[in-house]
Amino acid sequence: MTTTLTLPCPAKINLFLRITGRRADGYHNLQTVFQLLDYGDTLTLTLRDDGDIRLENALPGVAHDDNLIVRAAKMLQEKSGSTLGATLQLEKRLPMGGGIGGGSSDAATTLLGLNHLWQCELPLEQLAELGATLGADVPVFVQGHSAWAEGVGEQLQAIEIPEQYYVVLRPPCEIATREIFLHEQLTRNDPPIKIAAFLGGHLENSCEKLVRKLYPEVDKALIWLNQFASAKLTGTGSCIFAGFENKRQAEQVFAQRPEQYSGFVAKGVNLSPLHRALAIV
């Protein structure tokens, strides 16, 4: 019986984002494409037989029981009826507030990893439903495939996207999704488009104009990266990205970045590295 798993928590970028309306519950309907990346955090899960859930290296400023990893573990424990527990260790690489799905991916890896470790045998669809209660981006990481998304991001249709390389940069600022979605100047009435329109080159982000206005650091980073390729904001976070045909091109651009920008180079993948690790196809 497996007692320890070390699993990837991949990042994502939003290749485009349209906000098509505001719902009665205050959330927004949107359309987007989630592109999974081969870079992210790493989570080590070790089986416990005492039922305890322990996150050993909690994030500064986040209470233990409020951490998405702990919440995901306890939710699965309750749903499955498992009496087992786990010690969880997170190697954090993805920035908070970056719009690249770090916390959501960590939660998804927790659900899938513990489902395997505890032998709960819950199907992906049920795990995705659990994940959706933790955050709108969790289901795409649970399902494990780059996808067209609607609703609040939970209505997913797997699509195949050309696997290019991306430069992802993080300007020196952190953006709260809530702040952007509540802002009075946010465009909320984009007409919906079809997948064919996305494939034909509709790649705008409805939040980008507002974020550039509120956060000059993001604006400057987009101007810099636009020198090399079409640069975009991902989601409502502070990270920006641009796609390149090969790794060498991407690494050359990344090496020239101004020192105030952190980030990474990653390959866009259609199947999640997490699902490859767990042999879920």
Image (spheres, helix red, strand yellow):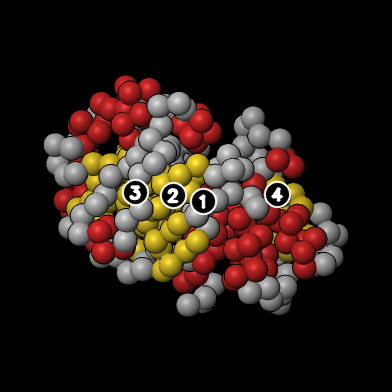
Check disc 3 and give the amino acid type: Pro
Give the mark nearest the N terminus, 3 or 4. Answer: 4
One can see residue 93 in this view = no
The residue drawn where x is 59% and y is 49% is 135
Q: Does residue 251 lie above or below 257 as drawn?
A: below
The residue drawn where x is 47% and y is 64% is 156
Q: CA distance from mark 1 to mark 2?
A: 6 Å
List the residue tagged with mark 4: 70
Toward the viewer: 209 or 168?
A: 209
Helix, strand or loop under label 3: loop
Q: Nearer the viewer, mark 3 or mark 1?
A: 3
List the residue tagged with mark 3: 191
Helix, strand or loop under label 4: helix
Give the mark nearest the N terminus, 3 or 1. Answer: 1
Q: Residues within 10 Å of mark 4 (few under 14, many from 20)?
A: many
List the residue tagged with mark 1: 152
Q: Does residue 110 lie above or below 218 as drawn?
A: below
